[in-house]
Image (cartoon, helix red, strand yellow):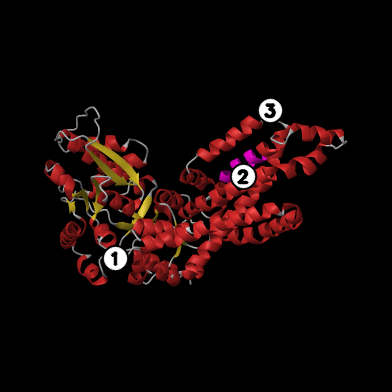
């Protein structure tokens, strides 16, 4: 019932996202069909290049979706244009291959009979080969369409909209209703498109001409509606992660606290800084210890009204692990207060700028701090240390690994890059990992989902907040917070330093006042 209530309460957002999802999928698949089918036909007449073309299409298919979007971002920016191009590229292989295969598998005897009747190559193609290959060709189109419906959810990470917005917000916030609100319509769309294409296949001869006319109309009407907004870059835009868009200490509360309203787009954390550097957005909310602040020459705006709560990092460990390996508590407690904000930021920078690997950065810090850091042969992995999917977490996970292996006989393995709080937390509660680095603010607002009165009473006192989170997490989930590491990686509003200095912006209030005087923001 709670999922149904969520769907009802957010029906307008779901409707808008569904429309965006349909538009992305249809446009990309239509372009892929218009290019892929003729290309497949061409290959049947020039088989000497077929292997090369299919090989290139196959290589594109193997590129991870988020990586491909990342490659396109510096060239095309954020929005629907790179999303459509990425979806088009992913749809090509099944369409080209099935067209090529379908025509090639036509019985040679039928082809010879057509030639014997005096048909030209074009007539054989149109009247014999294509009609016989329709089932195979449509199977490729249906496969490409279903694939694109799924991949289109990732396009939310580059501000292209679609049902992925709810999915990624839900994953970040451990909100199953939100995940289902994006996943269920996406699954239904895949089934619907597959059904429609199966019916079209039966009557393809009768509908081919109006279908072609409809395709042209679709491209004429929908493409401008989707693409034009992505080029209207004059408006001041803020790029936020899906998690920040919904967190209690995120954008909803930020708007009220500063009485500010921004033109927002949702971005993947890994692409957000690049989008700011490239000028695709004007302001982002990142992490105060992030190394990319220095790498990209960004300026952190002072939180002059003290909105963002403390986020003190600490190891979060399953209690059963501590019962089996009690020495872990003392080992990791050696990091109590050892890492300052400046040190963490410097370590992040070394990794983000491409100078060093996270493991080496972690090892170097521990060496400087006087810890043992010798390496030993890998065993079976008595425990597994997890991390979220950003630089700082990789470094901290390796710190835990190095310390545990140097001060005990425990063999530690790492499983880094888990996508967000929900994935890490679920893996920990299910004992798929033994521990991971977590933050006190996230513990209060996401893991414990504290009510408003509790939040207001704790958010400004870091010690009380940590004690509350530590006690409640142990009681409710049998998880243990070990002593904080020392640094506070809170949220930070940041802009390109050159632009912020030119506009004279030092604080978030300065930003608010500036936006109130912009005609496009009124």
Binning the other alpha carbons within 10 Å of mark 2 as few (below 14), some (14 to 19) or many (20 upward) gives many
- Residue, disc 2: 140
- In three-dimensional space, the C-alpha distance between marks 1 and 2, rounded to whole angstroms, equals 52 Å
Q: Residue at x 15, y 33 (%)?
A: 409
The tag earlier along the polypeptide, 2 or 3, is 3
Binning the other alpha carbons within 10 Å of mark 1 as few (below 14), some (14 to 19) or many (20 upward) gives some
Whether pointer 2 and pointer 3 mark residues with C-beta atoms closer than 8 Å, the reply is no
Q: Is residue 92 above or below residue 153?
A: above
Q: Nearer the viewer, residue 413 or 3?
A: 3
The location of residue 395, given as percent across then percent down, is: 28, 41
**Dominant secondary structure of the residues highlighted in magenta in the image:** helix
- Mark 1 or 3, closer to the camera: 3
Relative to 100, is 444 on the left or the right? Answer: left
Q: Residue at x 30, y 38 (%)?
A: 358
- Residue, disc 1: 307
The part of the chain drawn in magenta is 89-99
Is residue 279 among what the camera can see? no
The answer to if 98 sits in the magenta stretch is yes
């Amino acid at each position: 019932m709670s999922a149904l209530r969520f769907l009802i309460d957010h029906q307008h957002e779901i409707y808008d996202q569904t429309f965006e999802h349909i538009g992305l999928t249809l446009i990309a698949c239509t372009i892929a069909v218009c290019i892929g089918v003729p290309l497949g036909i061409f290959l049947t007449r020039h088989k000497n290049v077929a292997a090369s073309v299919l090989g290139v299409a196959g290589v594109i298919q193997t590129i991870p979706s988020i990586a491909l979007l990342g490659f396109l971002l510096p060239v095309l920016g954020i929005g629907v244009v790179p999303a459509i191009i990425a979806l088009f590229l992913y749809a090509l292989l099944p369409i080209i291959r099935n067209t090529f295969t379908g025509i090639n598998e036509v019985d040679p005897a039928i082809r010879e009979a057509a030639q014997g009747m005096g048909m030209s190559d074009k007539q054989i193609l149109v009247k014999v080969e294509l009609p016989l290959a329709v089932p195979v060709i449509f199977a490729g189109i249906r496969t490409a369409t279903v694939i694109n419906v799924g991949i289109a959810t990732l396009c939310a990470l580059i501000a292209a909209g679609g049902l992925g917005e709810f999915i990624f917000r839900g994953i970040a916030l451990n909100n199953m209703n939100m995940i289902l609100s994006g996943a269920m319509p996406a699954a239904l769309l895949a089934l619907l498109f597959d059904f429609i294409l199966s019916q079209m296949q039966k009557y393809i001869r009768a509908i081919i001409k109006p279908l072609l006319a409809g395709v042209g109309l679709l491209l004429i009407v929908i493409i401008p509606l989707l693409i034009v907004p992505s080029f209207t870059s004059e408006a001041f835009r803020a790029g936020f992660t899906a998690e920040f868009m919904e967190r209690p200490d995120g954008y909803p509360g930020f708007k009220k606290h500063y009485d500010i309203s921004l033109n927002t787009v949702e971005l993947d954390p890994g692409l957000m800084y690049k989008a700011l550097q490239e000028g695709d957005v004007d302001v982002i909310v990142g992490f105060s210890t992030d190394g990319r602040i220095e790498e990209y020459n960004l300026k952190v705006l002072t939180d002059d009204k003290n909105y963002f709560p403390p986020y003190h990092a600490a190891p979060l460990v399953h209690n059963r692990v501590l019962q089996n390996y009690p020495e872990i508590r003392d080992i990791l407690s050696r990091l109590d207060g050892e890492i300052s904000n400046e040190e963490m930021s410097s370590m992040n920078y070394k990794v983000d700028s491409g100078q060093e690997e996270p493991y080496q950065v972690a090892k170097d810090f521990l060496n400087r701090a006087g810890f043992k850091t010798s390496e030993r042969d890998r065993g079976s992995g008595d425990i597994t240390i997890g991390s979220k999917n950003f630089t700082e977490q990789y470094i901290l996970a390796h710190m835990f690994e190095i310390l545990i292996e140097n001060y005990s006989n425990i063999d530690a393995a790492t499983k880094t890059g888990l996508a967000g709080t929900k994935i890490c937390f679920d893996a920990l509660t299910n004992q798929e990992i033994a521990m991971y680095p977590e933050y006190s603010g996230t513990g209060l607002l996401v893991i414990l989902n504290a009510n408003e009165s509790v939040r207001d009473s704790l958010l400004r006192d870091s010690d009380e907040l940590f004690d509350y989170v530590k006690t409640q997490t142990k009681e409710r989930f049998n998880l243990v917070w070990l002593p904080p590491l020392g640094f506070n990686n809170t949220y930070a509003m940041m802009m390109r330093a050159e632009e912020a200095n030119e506009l004279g912006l030092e604080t978030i209030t300065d930003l608010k006042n500036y936006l109130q005087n912009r005609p496009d923001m009124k």
